């Protein structure tokens, strides 16, 4: 009898785990879809960027990263920063040291550039 209940328990736990995993994957897909939609809006509207900035700077950092618009806003800012760095690195610099600091060290985490 005990073996039968043990097997039933394992099957029930497996079913619950499979259902939870499926729901979590669906939630992740929805979150990613919302982030993509917000990024698209921000790419085409400075007003959308401004609204996101107001909202996201007022939220606690942990809460902001749970909000699709704030994740999209951070990704948007990072993309702008990368674009500015690329444009600055393509332009002629006044000194080799400035160019090295901005273009090579600026991409490294923890650098002083």
Image (spheres, rainbow, N blue to C red):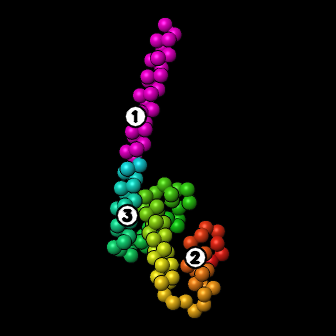
Residue 111 coordinates in the image, percent (x, y): 64, 72
Q: Secondary structure at mark 3?
A: helix
Neighbor class of circle 1 (other Cα within 10 Å; few <14, some 14-19, many 20+) is few
Neighbor class of circle 3 (other Cα within 10 Å; few <14, some 14-19, many 20+) is many
* Residue 104's disc number: 2
Q: Which residues are magenta?
A: 1-27
- Nearer the observer: mark 1 or 2; the answer is 2
Q: Secondary structure at mark 2?
A: loop
* Sequence-first tag of 1 and 2: 1
Would you identify the image quadrant in which residue 93 lies?
Answer: bottom right
* Residue 38's disc number: 3
- Looking at the image, do the residues carrying marks 3 and 1 touch, with CB atoms under 8 Å apart? no
Q: Secondary structure at mark 1?
A: helix
Q: CA distance from mark 3 to mark 1?
A: 29 Å
Front residue of 49/81: it is 81
Dominant SS type (magenta): helix
Question: Is 22 included in the stretch rendered in magenta?
Answer: yes
């Amino acid at each position: 009898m005990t073996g039968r209940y043990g097997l039933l328990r394992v099957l029930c736990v497996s079913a619950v785990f499979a259902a939870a995993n499926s729901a979590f994957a669906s939630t992740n897909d929805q979150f990613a879809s919302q982030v993509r939609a917000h990024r698209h809006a921000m790419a085409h509207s400075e007003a959308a960027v401004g609204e996101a900035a107001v909202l996201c700077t007022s939220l606690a950092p942990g809460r902001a990263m749970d909000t699709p618009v704030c994740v999209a806003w951070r990704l948007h800012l990072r993309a702008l920063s990368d674009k500015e760095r690329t444009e600055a690195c393509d332009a002629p610099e006044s000194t080799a040291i400035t160019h090295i600091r901005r273009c090579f060290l600026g991409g490294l985490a923890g650098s002083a550039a």
